[in-house]
Image (cartoon, rainbow, N blue to C red):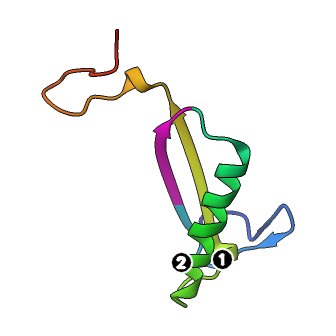
Amino acid sequence: MICSSEYLGIAHTGSVTFIQITCNEGHTVEMKKALFSNIASEIARGGAIDAADIIVHLVEVKKENWSFGNGIAQYAT
């Protein structure tokens, strides 16, 4: 097991899966909750991993921390 078998009242199995998403800052809590819910339900619908075993980590960064090619920080001023 790579994580606790139970955390915050949610039981985890040996199939726990971590998903990390990096995105721009500024999403509301409601948007984040909807994203987490949709990810877990869509993956669980496939049948291989239970929704309780989907752990999602959202990393929000400022727009100037991105480069979309050629080593240029397109949003940095």
Residue pictured at 66% horizontal, 60% vertical:
34
* Image position of 16 (left or right of 71): right
Residue under numbered circle 1: 51
Q: Quadrant of residue 5?
A: bottom right
Which residues lie in the magenta part? 19-25
At horizontal 65% and vertical 50% (from top left) the residue drawn is: 31
Earlier-in-chain disc, 2 versus 1: 2
The answer to whether residue 1 is visible is no
Q: CA distance from mark 2 to mark 1?
A: 7 Å
Against 50, is 57 above or below?
A: above
Residue density around tag 1, few if under 14, some if 14–19, many if 20 or more, within 10 Å: some
Residue 2 belongs to the span the image colors magenta: no
- Judging from the image, what secondary structure is the residue with disc 2 in? helix
Considering every residue shown, the one lying at the far right of the view is 9
Marks 2 & 1, CB-CB < 8 Å contact? yes
User: Viewer-proximal residue, 5 or 34?
Assistant: 34
Quarter of the image for the N terminus: give it: bottom right
* Mark 1 secondary-structure assignment: helix
